[in-house]
Amino acid sequence: MAHWLALIPKSSSLVSTDAPGGSQQQAIGWWALQFTPRVTLCEDAVLLELAASERLFGGKAALRKRILKEAEPFDCAARAWAPTGMGALALARGGVRNGFAGPLQDLLDALPLRTMSRVAAERPLLARLGCRTLGEVRRLPRAGLSRRCAPEVLKALDQAYGEETECHLWLELPERFDARLELPGRTESVAALMQGARHLLTQMAGWLAARHAGIRHFTLHWHHDGQRARAAGPGGELTIHTAEATRDVEYLGRLLHERLNRTGLKAPVSDLVLCAPEPESLTAGNASLLLEASLQREPLHRLLERLSARLGPEHVRRPQLVADHRLEAMQIWHPATAFQPSTTATTGVPVLPQPSWILPEPLPLAVHQEKPVYGGVLELLTGPHRMEGGWWDQRELDGRVIGDLTRDYYVALSPQAGLLWIYRHRVVRQGDNWFLHGVFA
Amino acid sequence: MNSVLPEYAELHCLSNFSFLRGASHPGELVERALKLGYRALAITDECSLAGVVRAHRVAKEKGLPLLIGAEFAVEAEPPFRLVVLACDREGYGNLSEFITRLRRASPKGSYRLRIGDIEPSALDDCLLLWVPDRAAEFDALSSQGRWLRSAFPGRAWIAVELLHAVDDKVWLQHMRDLGECSGLPLVAAGDVHMHLRSRRKLQDVLTAIRVGKPLTECGVALYPNAERHLRSRLRLGRLYPPDLLRATLDIAARCDFSLDELRYEYPQEVVPAGQTPQSHLRHLTYEGAKRRFPGGISEKVHKQIEEELKLIGELEYEKFFLTVHDIVTYARSREILCQGRGSAANSTVCYCLGITEVSPEKTTLLFGRFLSKERNEPPDIDVDFEHERREEVIQYLYDKYGRDRTALAATVICYRMRSAIRDVGKALGFDLQTVDRVAKNHQWWDARQAIEARLREAGLDPQDLGAQQWLSLTLQLLDFPRHLSQHTGGFVISRGPVSRIVPIENAAMVDRTVIQWDKDDLDTLGLIKVDVLALGMLSAIRRALEFMSQRYGWRHTMQDIPQDDRETYDMICAADTVGVFQIESRAQQSMLPRLQPRVFYDLVVEVAIVRPGPIQGGMVHPYLECRRKGEPVHDLKDELKPALARTLGIPIFQEQVMQIAMIAADFTPGEADQLRRAMAAWKRKGGLGPFHDKLVGRMKKNGYDPEFAEAIFRQIEGFGEYGFPESHAYSFALLAYVSSWLKRHEPAAFLAALLNSQPMGFYSPSQLVQDARRHKVEVRPVDVSHSDVQAALEYVPRAPAVRLGLETISGLSKVAMARIVAARYERPFENVADLAQRAALTVGDMKRLAAADALASLAGHRRQQLWEAAALRPTTALLADAPIHEQQLLLPEASEAEEILVDHAVLGLSLRRHPMALLRPELNKRRMLSSAQLRELPGGRHTRTCGIVTVRQQPGTAKGTIFVSLEDEDGTINVIVWRHVRERFRIPLLRSRLMAVHGQWQRQSGVQHLIADRLEDWSHLIGTLRAESRDFH
Amino acid sequence: MNAFSMGQGQLSLSDAQAPADDAPAAAPPVPVAATALATLPWQLASTVWRGSELLQRSGVVVPTGHAGLDRELPGGGWPCGALTELLQPHAGVSEWRMVGPGLGRLVAEGGTVLLIGPPQPPHLPGLRQYGLLPERVVWIESDGADRRLWIAEEAIKANVQGAVLAWLPKARPEQLRRLQSCAQRHSGPVFLFRPALVQAEASPAPLRLLVQPGTGGGIRLRILKRRGPQHESELELAALSSALERVLPRRVVRSAPVVPALHHGSLVGADSQVVVAGLD
C-alpha cells in the first residue's frame, strides 16, 4: 500500500503563497527529498510518498519517527499519513492525523467540504444543495455533479479516495541554488532585509540537506528600488565565506547580518536573490567555523560576546537613538548580545547642540549668590532652552519614571569643569532649583 | 526693563480649524487676546478661512480688531511657512481665491504650494510674513529673502518667532543680518497654536493623532515646549526688541478689512431682460395666484400678497424668491416632486409661486413674523425633493449658474464622544482592544460623565493618572472640528465667483465642492443659501400616485388626495402608522392615541409636540389635558391669546415662545432674535444664561406665574438642537397626512411605493412587508415569471397584490434584471434553460435567482432550482440548442428554518413564517408570551416576552430611558427600559439580537408597553435555527 | 576619503587612484620631499599589512581634526598601533572635543569606537555631532581597575577596526607597558585617559598630552611626550562643536578657535597635507 505524508507549513506573512519558490514550502520540499525522491508540492502542502523508502530507513515506524523529529524545526501547521496523497492532504486539513486508523473512505466521508480545495471552491453550491461533508457530495449523482461542477472536483475526489491514480510532478533538486524573494515592501532597514534573507537561507539549507551537503560560500544580491535607486545604482551583493562547509542557518544568518550592517544599504531594497554555487558533501559532526577575510581581526561580535560572558551582558552595551526632546529619553542602551542595529543614516546630525556626556541622574547644584556653582561659579552662556514634555510617559527609563518635565536649559561655563548643560525648573520649586544634566566634554 | 507693557498684535495664530494642529477654538483665542490687551489678532489657519467667521463673531461682539489671513507651508529649498494677511476687500478676495486654487488642485483636505507656483499678483493687496526655516543655511535664506522682497515690494516681512530655543539669541541676530542683506523688515510673531499654555497636552494629543502614533512614539514630532500660546505682553517685551513688536502694530494698521464688508449679490439671470426683480416677482405671483385660486383671488389674499411683496421689496429679497422659484419650476418641469418649508416658505407668495402646498387660507399667516425688517436676516426656505432625483436639481444649478458661482455649504464635522475617546485613547497608548471596548461601550445615551464608568468596565482604574488624562483630554477634544464635510443641501449661489467670498475646496464626493463655511457662518454674515434637500417620502408618494394613476386610469396628484378623511384619522389615532411620514416613530406612535388627531391642524401639533422643546418645557401633558377637556387653559391672559389661542394656550412651536418673550417679557424684536440665535447654538457654545434672568425676571415682574416662566425657559433650551417652527410642522404634517391616506386606502400601492423608495424611514422592508400583510395586503414572492425589476402591483386573480421586484435579490446585476424582464415580455419562459438562454444569464445569475427562490415557477423547490440552475454551463451557440437529457433528481427539500434564513440572507425578508414562530414551542416551554397574547393581557400584570430586536432608541428628552422594539410573528412589542435597568442590563441591552424581557405590562389610553425590569440575551436561539438549517453560506 | 596616512615613503596621488595593473600615471608626480607624508587608501593599506605590519603600522596616523595639533604630532595625527595618553585634571571635561573630530573619520570608514569605563554615560546625540554613529559605539562598563585593564587588553588584542578609548586612572606603568606591547598589533589608535597627577610617572606611551579647559570653552594643551623633539609651548585649541559654536554668544566664540564643522563640508580640506584620495 502506498504510504503518504502531507505536511502543511505555517503560512508566512512575509511571502505571499503564490510567490514561486520563495517559501517555506519549497524549503520543506527540498529537505524531504533526502527521504524519498517522490516529493511534490501540492497547493499549500508538501506531499511525500514513502513506501519505497521504508526498508531503507529501518521500517515504517522508524522512518515516521525520524521524519517527524527532523521536521520539527519547520514547525508545520498540520500533517497526516494516509494511503493516498490527496487523502492525506484532506485529512491533514481536517485535523485527522492518521489515515490508516480506519477505512479511508469512512475517514474522508466525514470531512467537511473545506478540506479539499477543489470541493471547497464549489461550496456555495454544494452547501445550498444540502451537502456538508465529502460523503454527501459523493452521494450526488456522478453525471449530474460533473455537469454542475468543475471536472476537477470529481477527479480530486476520486484520487483522494484511491479510485483513480494520482499523478504528481515530482520535485526536482536544482543543481545550483538560485532563489529569489520579493520583499513585502521596500525596505532600507538591514533587520527587515535579514528577515527575507533568513527565508532564503532556510530554503538553501533544505536544498543542502537533500544533497547531504554544505557550502563554503554563498552570495546575496539585492535590488534597489525607488527614486533614490538612480543615484545608488541597481543594487548590491555580498559574498559570505566560511572556513568549512556548513548549512547552519543560524550561523550563516549571523554572518550575513554582521556583514550587512557594515555594508549598509544605499537605497530601499525590493528583492533579494541568494546563490550558492558549489555544495560540498558534509561529513557528520562537522563543526563549521568562520573564516573571516582577515585572520588577524576578531569579529566585533565575537569580542563582545566574550566580554559579555565575562562581565555580564548588561555591562557591554550598544546604543539606539530615539527621536525625543527629553535628554534622558534620546537614547536606549541595549546589551550588545541582544543588539539589533538599525541604520540611523536617515536621522541627520542635530542642529542644536547636545552634550556628549549625560549624567545618569541630574545633579542638584549648589547656589552661591543666586548663581549655580560647579567647579566654580557658573557663567550662563546661552539659554533658556525650554523643554516641556513627557506628561504622557509613564514608562520606566533606567528604573525611573520621567513624567512631566518643564525645564529651562542653559549652556554654562565652569572654570574647572568646562562647558555644561544645566537646567532649572520652569516653575520655581522649593529647594533644589539648578541641576547639572550633561557636559559638552 | 520695560516699565510700560509693549503694545502687540499677534499676526501668526492657528485655531483648531487647522485640523489636528491648533488646540483652541477661534473664540477662545479672540477672548484671550483681548484679555492680554493685544491690539489685534490675526487668525491664520493653514490654507483655510474656515475658522474666521467664528472668530469674527466674538471679535465683533467684544471689540477686538481681527485680521483675516492664512498660513501656508511652501515647498522650496529650504522649505518655509508663509503667512498671508488681507489688507482690504480686494486682498481678501485674492486670498480666498488663492486658497481655492490650491485646495481645488488637491484631494480633499490637502493642498500643495511650491514656491514656483506663487504668482505675486495673485496676492495683491495682501501682506506677507515669511517664517524662514531655522535649519537652513544663511545663503539659501538670503536668496529666498531677496526673491520675496522683489516679488512683494513693501509688503513682505521676516517673521521672527522666538519660542525659547537655545539658539534664539543667535537666530535673532541671524535674522537681523538676513534683514539687512535682503532688505526685508523684521516683525515679531508667535506661531500660536493655543490660547493658553495649559492646552499643551491637548496640542500634543492632536499631534499624535495627526502623526498616527501613540505619544510615546511621536518623539520630535511633538513641540519641545508649550510656548506656542498667546503670551503676555510682559514676556513678549522681555523676549523681543521693541522695533519688532512695533512692527506688529504697523502691519495690523495696514490690514483694514472686516468680514462685515462681504456683501452678497444675487445672481442676475433670474430676472428676464426688460423686467425689474420687483416687477417680475409681482408678475409671477399673480400668475400663480390665478392658478391657485381658480374661483378668483379674495380680497384677503390680495391684501396679503401686497403686504408680503412690500416687505420683500423693502428687504430687497426679490431675487432670492425668484431663485427658489426657478429651482422649483425646473423640478416641476421634470416631474420631480418637491415641497418647500421654512420660515419664509409658508407665505402666500410662496404658495402662489408653487414653492409650498400649504394654502395660506388654511393656516394662520406666519410670514410677517419671520421676515421682518428689524431682524435683517436672510429668509429661510428649504425645498425638499424626491431623494432619488435631487441630483438632477443640483446638476441643473451647476449648469445654470456655473461651478464658480455655485457651491455647497460645509458641515463642520466635530469630535463626538466616541471618536474623541478613540483618538485620545490611541494617542495615550492604550491598547487597541481597550480603546475599542471603552468607545464601543460608550452609547449615545451616556452622559459625558459616564466615561468614567466605561473606563472602569474596561478594567481601568479611573483614578489612575493615565485614565484621568484620557478622561480630561477626551472632554477637551470634544466638539473640536475634525474636517469639513458637505452640508445636506445648502447651496450658495452668487452673482460673481463664490471663491472671492469664501474659499472653495473639494468634497469627498467626486465633482462636489464645498465652501469653507457652514450654515452658522453664513447666517452670521447674512449670506444667503438655498437648501436643496432630499426627502425619501416624496419619492414614495410620487410612486404611490403613479400606481393609482395606473390603476384608475387618470393622473393622480397630491391635490387629488381627499382632505379630512375620517378613516385616515381613525387609523392615525390607533397609532397604526408604520411607514407613514414623521408620525411612525415609537415616540410619535405612543402620542397618537392620546392626542387623537382629528383635523389637519392636530397633525401639525402632533408633528411638533414630540420634540425636545415642548417635552422639556413640560407642555405635553397640559396640552393633552386641555384637549381632553376641549378647552384652553383657564388662566390664559388676553395678551397671549393671539400667540397661543390656536394651541389651547399651550406654547408648542418655536415662534410661539418667541412671541411670549416679546409679549410677556418685553423683548424687542432684536432681542428676540438674539434669543433665537442663542437657542440654536447654546448646546455647543452655551450662553443662554443671561437670557434666563431677563426672560424669567421680566415675566415675573409682569405678573406671570414663575413656574410658567421657568417652563418657557426650559422649552427654549429644548428648542436648542431641534427648533421646530410651525411652518415646518405644516409642511411635514401635509406629507404625514398624504402618506397616511395612502396607507389607509391604497395599502398595496403604498407598500410597493415604499419598497421602491428604499432606503428610507424607520422601518426595514421586512418590517414594512410584515405590517402590510397584517393589513391583508397580499405580497407575492420574487419570481422570474412574474416580477419586474421593482415591486409592482398585480391585479389577477385578486386586486391588487404586491409582487416583489427582482431588485430584492442581493447581488443580481441591474443588467440581468432588465434582460429577464425584456425576455419575458416577448413570451413566458418555458423552463430554466429557456430563461438562461433568452435572458443571456450567467451561471452566477442563475444561481443567485435559485438562491432567492425566484425560479419556483419553473423548477420546484429551492434546492431543485439550484440543481437545475447549476447545470447550465456556458456552451457554444450550437450546443446550447441541444436538449439536455438528464434523469430527474429528487433532492430532499430544505428545512423551513433553512428556507427562512436563506430568505433573509438573500432577500432581506421572508414571506414564510416568522423565525419566532419556529421558536414558539421552545418559547412556550419557557412561558414567554407572544405579542398577540400580550395584547389580550390586562395592564399591570407581570409577564415575560421575547422577540427580535428591531429598534433601540433614546429620545434626547427621555432622561436616560431607552425604547426597545421587539418583533415576533404577531407584531411589535414596545419595551421601555428605565435608566437603572439600562445600567444593570447594559450588555444584554446592547448585544441582544433576540431579547427576552421580564417586566410589567402597561396599557393606558390605547398605548401599550412593557416596562422592563430584567433583560436577557437569547440570541443563541437564533443559532439553534441556524444549526438546524446547516451551513448554507 | 581616507583618514590614514603613512609616515614613510611617498605615493603620489595618481598612484593611489591608479588601476590595479599599475599603469603609469600621467598626472604630475608630487615632489617627494615636499610633505614627507605618504598616503595610502585604507583598503590598500589593510592588504599590505599582512606582510610587514609592524614596520608599516608604526607610521600610520589618524588626523586629529585639529589642524594646529596635527602640525605638532609626528606623522600628522593620532598614532595607530600605539598608546596615546591624555591627562586631565578632571575626567569628563574635554575628552570628546579632543578626540571626537578624529574619531568621526574612523567611524566614517567603518570603524567602531570602544569605550571602556567612561566617567559618565556617553550621550550619543552629542557624539553624533562628531560623526560618531550610534551603531558604531560600544560602552563597556566595569568598576574594578584590574578588570578594566583586562577589558582594554582584550579589546586591543581583538584588533577590531576602529579605536579603543579607556579610562584607566589607576593603571601602573608595568601594566601600561603590557598594553603598549599589545597595542602594536592594533591597527587603530588607542587612547588612555588618566589624571593629570600621573604626569610625573613614567609611561610607555609614545604620545602624552596634558589637556585642560581653556578660555571660553577652548582647550589648553601641552605635549608632554612625543617622538621627536620636545615640544615646549602650550597650544590653545579650537574645541567647540559647530552646533555649540552656532548658539553661543560671539564674545565666547571669538575667544576660542573653532573646529571645522563636520557637516558643513570637508573635514580635512583645510589641512592639505593629509589629503588622501580613496579608491571610492
Image (tube, coloured by chain):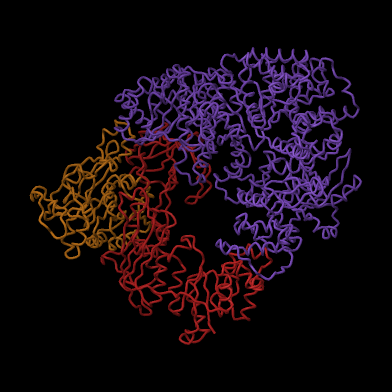
Chain colours: A red, B purple, C orange
Q: Is residue A402 left or right of residue B761?
A: left
Percent x, y for residue A37?
A: 44, 79
Closest to the observer, B426 or C116: B426
Tell me the quadrant of the picture where the N terminus of chain B can be found.
top left
Tell me the quadrant of the picture where the C terminus of chain B can be found.
bottom right
Q: From where the camera sits, is residue C215 visible?
A: yes
Closest to the observer, B185 or A350: B185
Q: From where the camera sits, is residue B1012 visible?
A: no
Q: Is residue C96 left or right of residue B899?
A: left
Please count the marks in the image: 0
Would you place residue B934 above or below residue B243 in this image? below
Percent x, y for residue B946?
A: 80, 52
Would you place residue A123 above or below residue B174 in this image? below
Q: Is residue B502 left or right of residue A247?
A: right
Closest to the observer, A205 or B722: B722
Would you place residue B642 above or below residue B614 in this image? above
Q: Is residue B418 left or right of residue C249?
A: right
Percent x, y for residue C84?
A: 24, 53
Can you tell which quarter of the image residue A121 is in? Answer: bottom right
Percent x, y for residue B445?
A: 71, 40
